[in-house]
Image: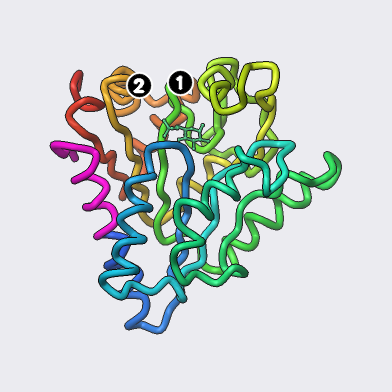
Amino acid sequence: VVFETSFSASKAVAKEIAELIRLKQTQNQLCILGLATGSSPKGLYAELVRLHREENLSFKNVIAFNLDEYYPMEPDSVNSYVRFMKAQLFDHVDILPEHYHIPDGTLEKDEIAEYCKLYEENIENYGGLDLQILGIGGNGHIGFNESGSLQNSKTRLVALDHVTRVAASGDFSGLSNTPRTAITLGVKKIMEAKRVILMAWGEGKSAIIKKSVEGEISNKVPATFLQDHNNATFVLDQGSASVL
Ligand code: GLP
């Protein structure tokens, strides 16, 4: 779906999420959301905060699982995804602190595999993700599932691609300070979400959006796996859709 601007697109995605949260409230059910970081969902989170403040949208029935976190990473570090999510959303709405989950960047290496297994089991125990929000990396990564990630890949520690580290290096004041690894939800759990919305803005994303939507399904571009999902939408602006 192509919108005039990322602003109108973000508002539409927020509206869909708000409707889902409210529907679950009327059914006395929890709403299980998979959330993403990066610049792309910032407008969505701003709109959700506005809906909370101005239109009484409550997040008390929301359980959130974030896609990924750099490893190693302290939660209070400037570039942590914990900090990002609190600043963009969690600190401004009434979600219960025990209801949001972000992969733990402070684990010992030998604890990670078991932790990742439990992260997935936790999602399964809630009945899976009702809706997964995604951005997309310039190389087609979703979460931190880089090129080469398999369609049935699990939640795990991954090595970041050079291009991903270069893209992040501005935030870390240089490539040498940029993490080399991250913990990411695997492609399998993303694909199991009942609904997936991938957001991408600007001409800089247009080439990878074309490959993801029109290219052949391949683990070279993990976002192409979404072509196989029965309820996935790419929400684009004029720029990111410009070469489709
Ligand atoms: C990081 C995140 C991804 C995100 C990507 C794109 O790599 N781990 O989940 O989709 O950045 O970021 P942006 O939205 O800033 O382009």
Any mark on residue 38, and which? none
Q: Nearer the viewer, residue 164 or 146?
A: 164
The residue drawn where x is 45% and y is 63% is: 92
Residue 135 position (above or below residue 193): above
Circle nearer the N terminus (2, 1): 1
State which region is magenta: 1-15
Quadrant of the rendered structure where residue 81 is? top right
Any mark on residue 208, and which? 2
Q: Confirm whether the magenta stretch covers residue 108.
A: no
Residues at circles 2 and 1 in contact by the CB criterion of under 8 Å? yes
The residue drawn where x is 60% and y is 58% is: 101
Check disc 2: other Cα within 10 Å, few if <14, some if 14-19, many if 20+.
many
Which amino acid type corresponds to the residue marked 1 in the rendered image?
Asn
The residue drawn where x is 39% and y is 30% is: 224
Count numbered badges in the picture.
2
Task: Give the colour scheme of this rendering.
Answer: rainbow
- Relative horizontal placement of residue 76, taking residue 40 as reference (left or right): right
- Relative horizontal placement of residue 129, taking residue 182 as reference (left or right): left
Residue 129 position (above or below residue 201): below
Q: Quadrant of the C terminus?
A: top left
Q: Confirm whether the magenta stretch covers residue 5.
A: yes
Which amino acid type corresponds to the residue marked 2 in the rendered image?
Ile
Any mark on residue 139, and which? 1
